[in-house]
Amino acid sequence: MSRSVERLLEAQKYAMSIRPKVGGFPVLAEVLRRAGVRTSRWSLPSCYAVYHLEDATVVQAGAPLVSGAQEIPAFDRDALIAALRTDQVGRSSFAEFLESAWKAGVVGYDIDFAARKVIYYGARGESYLEEYPAVELAGAN
């Protein structure tokens, strides 16, 4: 395993250990940013994530949301926002959030950790931009 992969996995593990149930994504994002992750691109429904670190690019495969051929749901901005708000208040797991985003027609999203922005994309070029707040990590310099 390369040092970049180890650094990413260690950061993810640490972030999950300190992540609050409510408002946890900004904590995860800040830990990744401090570990050198600049951007991330998620592809749904395959659940592949590409992380661009300052010195390498790492791919991480998750459990796919679908198998075989399926029609992509129409992009539904309101359903996506509802999925985001449900996740933000701690009423869904990450897997449930991904499923809800997929059902809202999201085929991917990009995270810019420095700008604290996420752009969600539909299959026909639709998009929705969500900003997230800066957080202070306890015990961090």
Image (tube, rainbow, N blue to C red):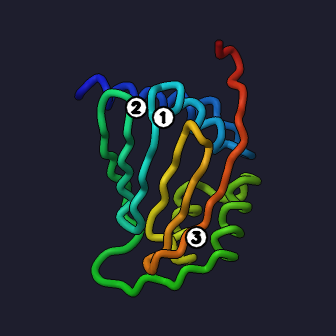
Residue at image position (63%, 44%) is 25
Compared to residue 33, the image places residue 63 above or below, namely below
Question: In the rendering, at what x and y percent does residue 6 appear?
Answer: 34, 26
Residue at image position (57%, 76%) is 104
Q: Where is mark 1, residue-wise? A: 12
Question: In the picture provided, is 21 more to the left or to the right than 73?
Answer: right
| Quadrant for the C terminus in the image | top right
Question: In the picture provided, is 101 more to the left or to the right than 86?
Answer: left
Question: In the picture provided, is 122 more to the left or to the right than 18?
Answer: left
Q: Find numbered disc 2 in the image and state the secondary structure of the residue it sits on.
A: helix
Type of amino acid at the residue the image marks with label 3: Ser
| Residue 30 or residue 46, whichever sits in front | 30
Task: Tell me, yes or no, whether the two marked residues, 1 and 2, touch with CB atoms within 8 Å.
Answer: yes
Q: Where is mark 3, residue-wise? A: 100
Compared to residue 128, the image places residue 42 above or below, namely above
What's the mark number on residue 115? none
| Residue 24 or residue 37, whichever sits in front | 37
Q: Find numbered disc 1 in the image and state the secondary structure of the residue it sits on.
A: helix
Q: Where is mark 2, residue-wise? A: 8
| Residue 8 or residue 99, whichever sits in front | 8
How far apart marks 1 and 3 lie (CA) works out to: 22 Å
Label 1, residues with CA under 10 Å away: few <14, some 14-19, many ≥20: some
Label 3, residues with CA under 10 Å away: few <14, some 14-19, many ≥20: many
| Quadrant for the N terminus in the image | top left
